[in-house]
Image: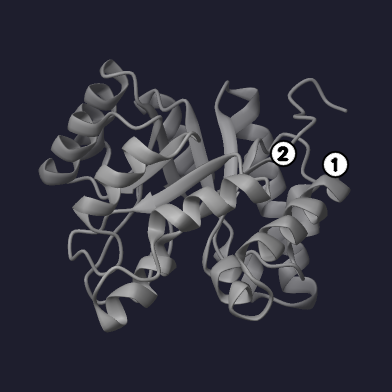
Amino acid sequence: MTSNSVSRLRLGVNIDHVATVRNARGGSHPDTLRAALLAAKAGADGITAHLREDRRHMTDQDIDILMDGIGLPLNLEMAATPEMLAIALRHRPNAACIVPERREERTTEGGLDAAGQFDLLAPIVRDLSAAGIRVSLFIAPDIAQIDAAIRLGAPVVEFHTGAYAHATGEAQTAELRRIADAVALAARNGIEPHAGHGLSYDNVLPIAAIPQIAELNIGHFLIGEAIFVGLEASIRQMRALMDEAR
């Protein structure tokens, strides 16, 4: 085990798509708070929720209810906008993960360009940190982006694993190596590495086995699998695979 290795890998469960299903019909079912409480019961270490500018899944009321109703840390995913900064500062969640956001995308695709948007991000990272909110940057496993995170003073980066998750064969092996190298570089520079996007039962083991990763954030797969086996069962199986990897 390396000096930066983490013995127990945390699982953050993203419940955005519980809200997606609810919003397809309207009303209050399925309930996001109930999903968060079930996730906690099943072994989640935290809850992740993305409040998008277009409110396509989570709503402001969801964030209000989750902040008051869960005993786990809340990781608020947010775009780098004045509106979202104000919301984060009002709620003061345990963590805020800054993500890229485009109206035309189905979900968050690709990492944040922390290097290209350095001047935009610097005051947001500063203000969140001053409020006691642990800032994470959702970035590609890329040296330039890690360097920007270091200069921004972000304590956490979450590496986008989408390219790995969607690749096969040698291409997936290369993406895994790229992620492992990026994780090691971040850890050497005092940044806590997280990872997420596109992870499933079939591909999580190699990512979970990277010793310096402290947390995986997984949502869409777990909510989708819950249709067949129930939310608790889907999360418990992921938790077991993560523990197996360590």
Residue 189, can we see it? yes
Name which residue lies at 57% across and 21% down: 190
Residue occupied by mark 2: 9
> What residue is drawn where x is 30% and y is 82%?
24
Is residue 45 toward the left or the right of residue 36 in the image? Answer: right
Q: Is residue 11 left or right of residue 94?
A: right
What's under tag 1, amino acid-wise? Arg
Observer-nearest of 184 and 107: 107
Circle number at residue 246: 1
Instruction: Confirm or deny contact between disc 1 and disc 2 (CB under 8 A).
Output: yes
Dot 2: element: loop
Q: SS at mark 1?
A: loop
Count residues near mark 2 (Cα–Cα under 10 Å), then give few for <14, some for 14-19, many for 20+: many
Q: Is residue 53 left or right of residue 236?
A: left
In the rendered structure, find residue 84 and report the number of the disc placed on it.
Answer: none
Q: Position of residue 84 (x, y in %)?
A: 18, 44
Tell me where residue 195 appears, x and y as whole percent.
59, 48
Camera sees residue 114: no
